[in-house]
Amino acid sequence: MRTPLAERFGIEHAVFGFTPSEHVAAAISRAGGLGVLGCVRFNDPKELDDVLTWMDENTDGKPYGVDIVMPAKIPTEGSQVDLESLIPPEHRAFVDRTLADLGVPALSDDAEHASGVLGWLHSVARSHVDVALGHRISLIANALGSPPRDVIEQAHEKGVPVAALAGAVDHARRHVENGVDIVIAQGYEAGGHTGEIASMVLVPEIVDALGDSAAVLAAGGIGSGRQVAAALALGAGGVWMGSYWLTTAEYKLGSASGEGPSAIQRALLGATSSDTVRSRIYSGKPARLLKTKWTDAWTRPDAPEPLPMPLQNILVSEAHQRIAASEDPDVVAMPVGQIVGRMNEIHPVAEVMDELVTGFREAATRITRYE
Amino acid sequence: MRTPLAERFGIEHAVFGFTPSEHVAAAISRAGGLGVLGCVRFNDPKELDDVLTWMDENTDGKPYGVDIVMPAKIPTEGSQVDLESLIPPEHRAFVDRTLADLGVPALSDDAEHASGVLGWLHSVARSHVDVALGHRISLIANALGSPPRDVIEQAHEKGVPVAALAGAVDHARRHVENGVDIVIAQGYEAGGHTGEIASMVLVPEIVDALGDSAAVLAAGGIGSGRQVAAALALGAGGVWMGSYWLTTAEYKLGSASGEGPSAIQRALLGATSSDTVRSRIYSGKPARLLKTKWTDAWTRPDAPEPLPMPLQNILVSEAHQRIAASEDPDVVAMPVGQIVGRMNEIHPVAEVMDELVTGFREAATRITRYE
């Protein structure tokens, strides 16, 4: 799947794989795609620096990228304490009551309490950029719209292209005006932050609107070679996959023992394509999540409206930590796309990539026969 | 686009075109696809019979089909009067108030008042089947799930295959168990009745679930040759397109003068892919509609919950008639998919088909180069 965009990045297959796991990201790059490491979980820049050094050493010299989360429109900066004071007590009471109802234990006394995802604040995201540009990265992606112009310029000075997610044509145009090089057209069916327009409509619309001004990756609903073929037929220069890597053998995040599928993986393996919801409860913006007892609780009549970003994530961050520690597949808090219906077995990353390539070839050959 | 399914129907291109207009349906068949005439608007079987005679004479001997609306689970039968009595007065008052607010005039004294879409009652839908089987039809499709088994058997006795829409894998399986020959996988982005799962995920899922037991058509988000290529890459045997024909030159329904684009067409031509909503206000079941002042009104705090099928359509049928007569592009009541964003010019059906074929070939050739 060597599209012009793949050639530009010097990769064998136009598969851009987003994942918070360095083990998965490195395996994607080694398999001929471009592994893109999600940085939002690194509150400490030193920890990110160490992980990127590990990436440098474990990708066989192949290219990889990073994904930061830098919302363009959030004025709230400042310390954790300032932000905590903006969270209404009713919201905290609902979270506490819900966790008790769902049987999620409190954290043990020696657990380090989560302090909210500071990666969503500009100051922290900028430190991620500074750290990442000290490594041999090939892409900076921003999961929440265009990064600030000076960040784009900083990346361009080092020769690193910048990608940004868009759920509608006008977002895509704005990204390109801001200097973004690659637009990730994120369809309704995608996991995480997503708009209302499905990939089948969104991808060609953004491809046509941007013309030669930027490359387009298709995101949302992709987990097989047939879906890669569909995305490229729609005009995308490559695919952006996130959810599908969560059930690879290399994905060990959220697993206490590291042995066998984690509670999150077991929940994903059992879910169908109907088992997701699009909700503001994860971050404050609409994001597609696995449907569980936790997401159901937020649809009850007594549930409060989710708070705006970044307050909602600060509100639920300790809840997420408690839910993860409880390892109950019925009470998972996890972004995932509708492709979860196809995530039914654990496979190593290399096997996933093999199917993408083989399935793509079969689909391309099959439809050519219909000409 | 001569897939095995196209060969089975003896058509040149695997494009199944659903439309309530006999002029459009005949043009689709003449252009090498399969025109499928929507029958729900024919309350009088004689009128349908005459129109199908016209179809027999105006399709150059090429195959065509019909679409009936036969909900499997509606026990409510009986006269219009019985059903009218089940509609709460608050609902009627809201409709009257809303039409007044939106400046939609009452019907003129000589207008024939709509009596609700009786085509949605089994008795009327069965008469449609009886009438249609007296003509040389090649397909009976049901827009609302499996038709009753005896209707399927009646069609099969005449050698006519039966198609049914499905928005999820379990619906598709049930259709095949009931004897349905072709499943139309209708994605979230589609116009009219639609589920939650987008085409990119739904189509391969249904293709894999059914295997050789039934053919699959991809519906939702298709209006260009690239999208046909994507649908066939996903494993569909052909495409089912509905919305896209609404802005063809042959579509004259809802146009008082018959000259130039109608109010509905002008509304569609100006809409983007973000200008649709999925709502129960049209029929009682979730259906994607053009977003207008009419759909907005039903999201206001004072709006009642839509009634179940078929009551909601009986409630709004005179409103639909008044809205159509008012010819105001801002107050349209029209099912349409997200592909409306690509419906920006009026073209004859034959030109649409030419683009589908050319665009398909280009896409197939392009992705083959990436192998």
Image (cartoon, coloured by chain):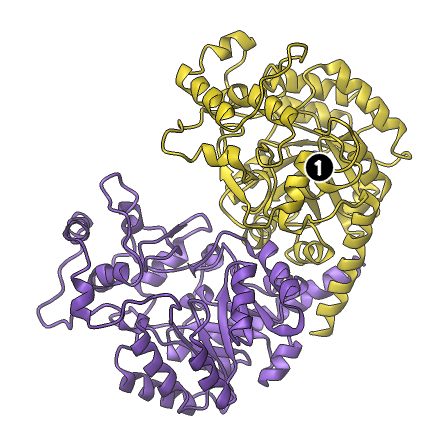
Chain colours: A purple, B yellow
Give the chain of mark 1: B
Query: Quadrant where the C terminus of chain A lies?
Result: bottom right
**Is residue B6 rendered to the left or right of residue A96?**
right
**Residue A79 percent location from the top left of the image:** 20, 72
Give the class, few, some or many, for how many residues have Cα within 10 Å of label 1's Cα (few <14, many ≥20). many
- On the image, the x and y values in percent for residue B3 come to 77, 51
Q: Tell me the quarter of the image containing the N terminus of chain A.
A: bottom right
Q: Secondary structure at mark 1?
A: strand
* Horizontal side, residue B179 vs residue A264: left or right: right
Q: Which residue is under mark 1? A: B18
Residue A249 vs residue B340, the one in the foreground: B340
User: Does residue B219 appear anywhere in the picture?
Assistant: no
Residue at (53% x, 7% y) in the render: B81
The residue under the point 61% across, 63% down is A231
Amino acid under disc 1: Phe
Residue A366 in the figure: left or right of residue A154: right
For residue B299, above or below residue B135: below
In the displayed structure image, the side of residue B341 where residue B301 appears, left or right? left
